[in-house]
Amino acid sequence: APRTTRSRGGVSTGEYNNMLNARLAANATPFGIWAAAAAASPSSSVYRNTTDQCVAYMSSVDGQIMPMPDNIVPKHYKDIANISDPKLRDTWYKAYDTEFLGLIQNGTLKPMRRPAKVRVLPLKEIASRKSDGRCKWRGCVMGNLMRPGVDFTKTFASVVRYGTTRTVLNVAAQEDMELITCDQPMAYTWAERGEGETWYCEMPKGLKGKPEYCYIDPITGEEKDMVCEVGNLYGAPSAGNAWWNMVKSINKAFPGLVQSEADPSCFILTRNSTKLIVVIYVDDFGIFHSGTTAGKALAHEYIEHFNKHVGKPLKVHEGKVHEFLGLTITKTQTGFKLSASKYIDMLRARFFPSGVTHAGYKVPADKDLPSIVISAAEKKTVPDPQLLQRCQCLIGSLMFATNARPDIQYTVSQLARCMAWPDANIEAAAERCLIYLIGTQDLGLHYERVADPKLFGCSDANWCTRQSTSGCAFKIGTAIISYFSKKQGHISLSTFEAEISAGTLAACEAVHLRSLLASLGYKPKGPTIIKIDNTAALRVAEDPVMHDKTKHILRKELKIRELVESGEVKVEYVESLKNFADFFTKPLPRKEFESFRKEIMNDTA
């Protein structure tokens, strides 16, 4: 049915929105709301609201709520009681106690009588299922209510860049290294809260009313729930900063482990002929070690060193297949493969719960995508709230998939320009991109050993009368490690101006990659080659020629010339049909698209 008339279990869109607003205002559970909906529409059969994590089911008999199915995640503590399976219900209760009693035991939450004249923040309780099926609760303090400069100061916390992870995978493939992934349980809670910071929050809902967490008010004589003094808990703006400082100090205390200047979340150790590389993303650790007995011993020595400084040991996973940062890393006979297959499975279940009925696509975008995006950007029509939410969630989810799927980078870059005012065409283009991913789910970046790995890149630009699109990709050996598709920040007056701007972005990325590779033990010999398919841009990158056409160009757009003169970068000409950066600037015909895809990903569908 059209979006304006589509019903939810006999409830119109307008009635549904009114009920949803009422639920949000009253902070009620979905069950009471949907009971009222069922009573208002007794002819409705069982309906499942797939947009909520916690799903209410209603029957056609007097609006009575049925027990919650076993595969549904509860949204509130009291929803656990509606789970039909006793064992699963007990599992959720146990997971709740494990989380919140654990926070109390390790001192992150300290129950106490409510002090006078203090702000007590709400405590958000979030339930989820992990990828291995485990039931998990997470307690988060409502940090959005904290005041900067009063309740907290520093918030910086470094996380490893996905480009760094891809580069490390390539290096690991060249040296036949092994991977161990680790996860730190309750990570933030082991760090010390920032100096001078004191927070209080309400008692967890599942513990309210219990005698040990109540007290008698000496003035009124009433029984009241205790509050908790909060330690370094998730949700606090400065919690990440405290955890990062703790991780950094632990790593620096490990003999020989050096922090990379190119990426502060990457640490490297070389001991004799044994190498150890540690990349960290909050509480997820990727530990690459030489594939020898000494290398494995060094990795476990580091894990033991880290465990001495935290309350719970790292959860260690060894094997050929790893889930790391939401992506799948597979150890192959010749190297490593980075894919998003499981993540795509999750997107399929979320956005196409009834299955994909459309035939698969061979390319992620139609040739009309640029005109569709320009049309939506010019109209700036206020979209239907449901359309807006779906498009923003879908495009945002596709953005994450680009970390392992460069073949959709251009498409997602274009779609992201219309996230504030999407229309039906933008939604269709985003769904097409996801259907393409589902049809090519097993594709990924395959890094293999090569005899002489060298860093080189290509840059390109798609000039238009508005802001042009820059594309760039860098490759070592068999697959690319860094790539982007970006809208330029200015309007270029000519094709060559757009190309020189793209070349400058590529040159700056080359400087970063050279520094990163040097810290990993692969210092580039000589300048890094950047291939450009525009002769005018090539000339301007080497010498200050064509004054009449370059006098208006900002100095920062000509940074590439400075890097060429310093010997860090060298520019070379390449034919357009061989410039794989073209892959990131425009929608290509199927034959060219598949040819470039194989070249940059080293994988076939």
Image (cartoon, rainbow, N blue to C red):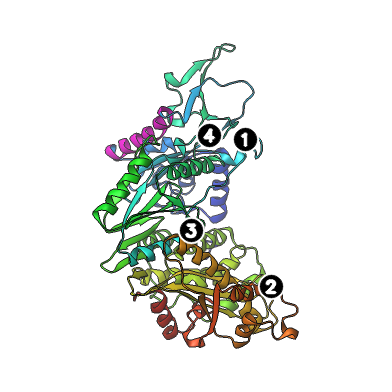
Q: Position of residue 351 (x, y in %)?
A: 44, 61
Q: Residues within 10 Å of mark 4 (few under 14, many from 20)?
A: many
Work out how far the residue at label 4 is from the one at label 1, CA to CA, in angstroms.
11 Å
- In the rendered view, tell whether residue 180 sits above or below residue 247: below
Identify which amino acid the numbered label 2 is placed on.
His
Q: Mark 3 and mark 1: span between their CA atoms?
A: 29 Å
The reply to whether the C-beta atoms of the residues labelled 4 and 1 are less than 8 Å apart is no
Q: Front-most of 604 and 67?
A: 604
Magenta-tinted stretch: 87-105
Q: Which residue is mark 4?
A: 193
Looking at the picture, which amino acid does disc 1 mark? Asp
Residue annotated with mark 1: 151
C-alpha separation, residue under disc 2 versus residue under disc 1: 40 Å
The mark that comes first in sequence, 4 or 2, is 4
Decide which of tag 3 and tag 4 comes sooner along the chain: 3
- Measured in 3D between alpha carbons, the distance from the residue under mark 4 to the one under mark 2, in whole angstroms, is 44 Å
Question: Which residue is labeled 3 in the image?
Answer: 161
**Looking at the picture, which amino acid does disc 4 mark?**
Arg
| SS for dot 4 | loop
Separation of residues labelled 2 and 3 (CA atoms) = 27 Å
Q: Residues within 10 Å of mark 2 (few under 14, many from 20)?
A: few
> Mark 3, residues whose alpha carbon is within 10 Å: few (<14), some, or many (≥20)?
some
Q: Earlier in the sequence, mark 4 or mark 1?
A: 1
Marks 2 & 1, CB-CB < 8 Å contact = no
Report which residue position mark 2 lands on: 490
Q: Determine the CA span between mark 3 and mark 4.
A: 26 Å
Residue 471: x and y, percent? 54, 75
